[in-house]
Image (cartoon, rainbow, N blue to C red):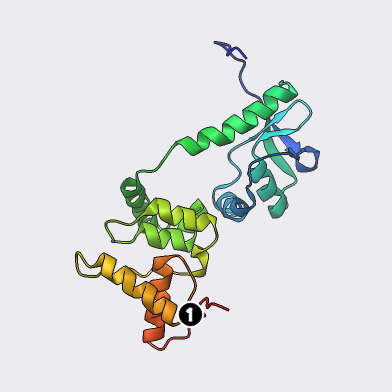
Amino acid sequence: MDIKKTQPMLNIQNVRLSLLKPWEDNPRINDEAVDALVKSIEFFGFNVPLLCDQEFNIIAGHTRWKAAEKIGMEFVPVIVLEISETQRKAFAVADNKTAEIADWDYQKLRNVLDELKSKKINLPSLGYCQAELQALFSKQRQFDWKEFQERMKTNLVPKYTYFPVKIPFGSRDKFTKAVHQSAKLHKIKNGDVAVLSGQVLAILLGIDNGKDTVK
């Protein structure tokens, strides 16, 4: 598809929510993002229009559509594009995929969030859960954010809170081995060394932590 050098100005319409049709074969899984977006809309308003084709099939904005439905909105802002079915599907995939390419400078992100926090901005309204905020504001220098995000995707992290500890430099391997040995002794099953460490520590402190045990 050729990209035109000049395009007409986009026209934003207020469309009844019930007229919009989601893409039933949408490969993007977005249910987990709906509640966070609801908070954002309630705090900032519905400021990003949905994209639809001429028959009101949603191209981009399925999560916003679900959030608006959950809130009970009757009308939402929509930009209608004259586009073929093939172009609609291609655009929908591209819109989601290109959003994944960008990454974060986590130090700068923490600085911005810290500033917003000082201005009394409710950080969860920006889409961050408590576990993510605790990780971002952790003072541990070598925090593995990518590993944390993978654990978030598998819904392991929301069960826990982040509690940083310090061990002597150079003893990480010995510490990890000791944690696994203690976990095996107490019949704790979990491949995440951070979770295992917390569960072992809880046992040593006599805390009932609802550990995952081998059956």
**Front residue of 6 and 30:** 30
* Residue 12 located left or right of residue 55: left
The spot of residue 158 in percent (x, y) is 51, 65
Q: 93 or 177, which lies in front? A: 177
Q: Residue furthest left?
A: 169
Q: Is residue 96 left or right of residue 199?
A: right
- Label 1 neighbour load within 10 Å: few <14, some 14-19, many 20+: some
Res 138 quadrant in image? bottom left
Instruction: Give the percent coordinates (x, y) of residue 21.
Output: 77, 38
Q: Position of residue 135 (x, y in %)?
A: 38, 60
Image quarter in which the N terminus is found:
top right
Q: Is residue 203 above or below residue 40?
A: below
Q: Which residue is mark 1?
A: 187
Local SS, label 1 = loop
Marker count (numbered)? 1
- Report which quarter residue 14 is drawn in: top right
Please determine whether, in this image, residue 40 is positioned above or below residue 86: below
Q: Is residue 110 visible?
A: yes
Residue 145 rendering spot, x and y as whole percentages: 39, 53
The type of residue carrying mark 1 is Lys
Q: Say which quadrant the C terminus sits in.
A: bottom right
**On screen, residue 128 above or below 25:** below
